[in-house]
Structures are given as C-alpha cells and as structure tokens.
C-alpha cells in the first residue's frame, strides 16, 4: 500500500519517482505528462496542458491528485478524468486523458542524456546535488532544477535519463494538435519549464512541504 502523504503542516519531503514527458505541437498546444509508478499518492499519471492562448489545464485522475498538484503548480482549469499512460512498445508511449489522446515515440539518448545516465542514481536524486546543479543548468539551458513552488513548497528535480521525442500524434476533443514541435513559449505552470526540445525524462521529484 502506498504511504499516505503527511498533513500539510508537516515540514516533510515527498518523493515522486517516474517520468516526465514534455512536448510542443505545431498547433501551439504544449503538453507535460507526469507518469509516477511510485509516489506518496500511489501510482498515478497526470497531464498539464497549456493551450496556444496561454490557458493552463490540469487533467488529474482523482481529487487527491488534483488537490496536491494544484497546490504545487498554477492552473486556470482543473478537470477530473481517467488518465491512462502506457508503453506498448519500448520507444512508444500512449496517453488517454479525457479530451486528450496522444501517441509518441522516442529516439536514442542525446549527449545530455548520456551524461545524465552516467551519474549514479543516489547522487543524481539527492537534493544537495540537485541544488548545486541549479545555477549551471540556468546558465547553460535556461532551465531550473530547484525552486519555490506553490504554497511555500520547494521542489528538486533529480534527472536520471533523457530520450528525445521523435514523433507525436495527438488530438484534443477529437481535433488534431499537429505534429511534434519545440516547447515554445515555455510552459508556465511553475517556477520552471520542461526543456524546449521535446523529450522523456526519467526523474525523481522531491517536494518539501511548507
């Protein structure tokens, strides 16, 4: 049974172990999928959608997940829908979440992926190491590995691996979203965005409650 999250008054650190898929589309819609087989909330997946006009939508599978994610990030709309993320093939991912249907494929690790994969997992996910990487990451890529989230929470993104996304086929309420495109402009759910180049990141996210 999954460990229950502590009360919001506890200054505790929660670890979410899984993957983050981030991609843009030629329609201008940007998609961030979290797939968490191990977390204090149990196994779950969620989807953050930013539409071309900037409208931010959270697709969450339960009120518990919606409450936690919406207290950590910022959205204009929250929808409770079944969220199913699967890997029918080694490099293929499928996402079915209410109005969203998506199928994507990944390629080999880019140079950054090989570098990340070479770091021992215990070190790569330690908040001290992640915090030390925050400034170099901002200078080299414009991305953050540590920052302040909603409700006084702090997050650390410990990245273990990276594969580029090569193809995307997605629809929103039955309308095609186009093909794969960079995540531009950056998404604005929290203190940082996903990389501009579409990718699937193996990650351990640590959230410290206020």
Image (spheres, rainbow, N blue to C red):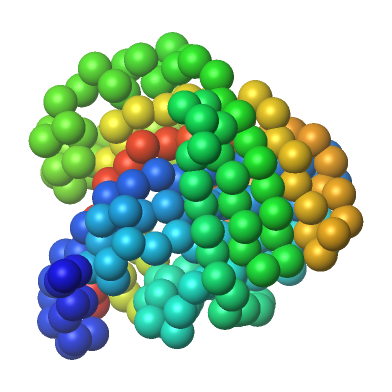
* Residue at x 11% of width, y 35% of height: 122
Q: Is residue 169 left or right of residue 175?
A: left
Residue 9 is drawn in which quadrant?
Answer: bottom left
Q: Is residue 113 left or right of residue 42?
A: right
Q: Is residue 47 left or right of residue 124?
A: right
Answer whether residue 208 is visible to the viewer in this image.
no
Q: In front here: 159 or 96?
A: 96
- Image quarter of the C terminus: bottom left
Is 130 placed above or below 96 here?
above
Is 55 placed above or below 196 here?
below
Q: In front here: 104 or 137?
A: 104
* Residue at x 85% of width, y 59% of height: 174
- Image quarter of the N terminus: bottom left
Q: Residue furthest front?
A: 88
Answer whether residue 1 is visible to the viewer in this image.
yes
User: Percent x, y for residue 202?
Assistant: 36, 37
User: Percent x, y for residue 148?
Assistant: 35, 63
Is 169 placed above or below 77 here?
above
User: Percent x, y for residue 134?
Assistant: 32, 40
Q: In front here: 201 or 76?
A: 201
User: Percent x, y for residue 168?
Assistant: 71, 36
* Residue at x 20% of width, y 22% of height: 119
* Residue at x 66% of width, y 41% of height: 103
Residue 5 is drawn in which quadrant?
Answer: bottom left
Q: Is residue 208 left or right of residue 31?
A: left
């Amino acid at each position: 049974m999954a460990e229950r999250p502590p009360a919001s008054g506890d200054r505790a650190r929660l670890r979410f172990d899984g993957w983050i898929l981030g991609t843009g589309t030629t329609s201008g819609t940007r998609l961030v999928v979290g797939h968490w087989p191990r977390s204090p909330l149990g196994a779950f997946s969620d989807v953050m959608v930013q539409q071309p006009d900037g409208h931010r939508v959270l697709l969450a599978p339960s009120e518990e997940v919606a409450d936690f994610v919406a207290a950590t990030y910022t959205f204009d709309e929250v929808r409770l829908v079944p969220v199913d993320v699967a890997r029918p093939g080694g490099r293929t991912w499928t996402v079915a979440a209410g109005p969203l249907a998506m199928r994507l494929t990944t390629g080999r690790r880019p140079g950054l992926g090989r570098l990340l994969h070479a770091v021992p997992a215990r070190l790569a996910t330690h908040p001290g190491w992640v915090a030390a990487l925050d400034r170099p990451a901002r200078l080299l890529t414009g991305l953050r590995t540590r920052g302040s989230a909603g409700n006084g929470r702090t997050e650390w993104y410990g990245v273990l691996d990276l594969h580029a996304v090569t193809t995307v086929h997605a629809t929103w309420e039955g309308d095609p979203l186009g093909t794969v495109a960079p995540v531009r402009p950056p998404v604005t759910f929290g203190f940082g965005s996903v990389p501009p180049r579409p990718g699937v990141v193996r990650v351990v996210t640590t959230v410290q409650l206020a």
